[in-house]
Image: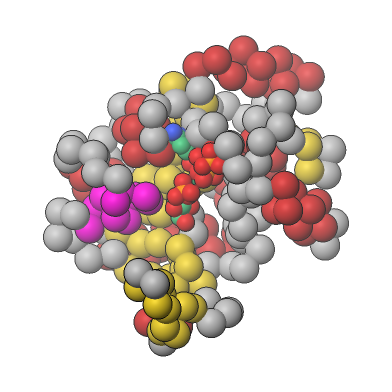
């Protein structure tokens, strides 16, 4: 079996959430979101090496939270960067060179064990795998002043964890940044590598806005 590593990115500003406390530290079910996310992956594989990316200025607060909540899962800490791309790159610098590596948003605590397994299994065969779900609403494309309905069957919503062979991801993150790199698959694809799609889970929301916190609290009680 291939060795597994994981980068959890929580280095963003959370501007769309707003508020004083960064969204990854907001409590859901009595615990900071980020702890729920880390626990989910530790449950999947307690041997997995976890690299957590956090803004430098939040690291002391996080360490205090770990003491307060008696959080015992081990992780390495890397500094957040200017964009998600730069945060992942900082995390990758602490990763070993071999095996598989996943990248997961710290604010997606509800990824299922089945989806994590599916992503790692597919990546062990295809080198690159990401979870996606169907679009459940009609999509409209805006063209200047006009707009038109497009066929939603041509689109998928993309989630994390996005899993790759570590050698491939390290090579991909050696490329120069472009704003089109909004996830890890887009970075790998820029090298001409095909990414396999596996089924994600609808609960695997990215907690982005205050509305998502309402959903998160409801999901935690299901
Ligand atoms: N410079 C950045 C930007 C984003 N992220 C992480 O990437 C994930 C997805 O980003 P998103 O949820 O959209 O977070 P923010 O960029 O923080 O949100 P916003 O755009 O509202 O400021 C989050 O876990 C976020 O912390 C990161 O590690 N470093
Ligand atoms: C990586 C991601 O979660 C895939 O859906 C997403 O692109 C990150 O969110 P952002 O708003 O683009 O930072």
Depth order, front residue of 178/104 = 178
Most frequent secondary structure within the magenta stretch: helix
Q: In the displayed structure, does residue 135 sit left or right of residue 101?
A: right
The mark total stands at 0
Q: Which image quarter holds the C terminus?
A: bottom right
Picture layout, residue 63 above or below residue 102: above
Report whether residue 140 is seen.
yes
The percent coordinates of residue 93 (x first, y second) are: 31, 27
Q: Residue 196 appears at what percent x and percent y?
A: 32, 68
Residue shown at 44%/21% (left/top)?
79
Where residue 124 appears, x then y in whole percent?
32, 59
Dividing the picture into quadrants, the one containing residue 220 is bottom right
Q: Which residues are magenta?
A: 180-189
Q: Is residue 134 left or right of residue 92?
A: right
In this view, 118 is above or below 186: below
x, y percent for residue 23: 66, 36
Residue at the far front in the pictured view: 145
Q: Is residue 10 above or below residue 136?
A: above
At a point 37% along the width and 50% down the height, the residue shown is 182
On screen, residue 129 versus residue 33, left or right, reads left
Magenta-drawn stretch contains 185: yes
Say left or right for 148 vs 71: left
Q: Nearer the viewer, residue 108 or 116?
A: 108
């Amino acid at each position: 079996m291939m060795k597994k590593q994981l980068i959890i990115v929580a280095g963003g500003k959370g501007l769309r959430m707003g508020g004083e406390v960064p969204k990854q530290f907001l409590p859901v079910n009595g615990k900071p979101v980020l702890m729920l996310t880390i626990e989910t992956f530790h449950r999947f594989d307690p041997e997995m090496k976890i690299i957590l990316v956090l803004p430098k200025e939040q690291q002391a607060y996080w360490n205090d939270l770990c003491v307060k909540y008696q959080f015992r899962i081990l992780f390495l800490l890397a500094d957040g960067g200017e964009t998600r791309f730069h945060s992942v790159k900082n995390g990758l610098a602490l990763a070993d060179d071999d095996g598989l590596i996943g990248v997961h948003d710290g604010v997606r605590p509800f990824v299922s064990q089945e989806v994590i397994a599916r992503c790692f299994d597919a990546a062990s065969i295809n080198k690159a795998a990401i979870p996606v779900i169907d679009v459940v609403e009609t999509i409209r494309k805006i063209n200047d002043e006009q707009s038109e309905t497009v066929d939603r069957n041509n689109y998928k919503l993309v989630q994390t964890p996005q899993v790759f062979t570590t050698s491939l991801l390290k090579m991909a993150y050696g490329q120069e940044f472009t704003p089109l790199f909004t996830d890890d698959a887009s970075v790998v694809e820029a090298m001409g590598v095909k990414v396999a799609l596996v089924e994600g889970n609808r609960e695997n929301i990215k907690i982005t806005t205050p509305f998502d916190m309402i959903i998160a609290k409801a999901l935690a009680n299901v």
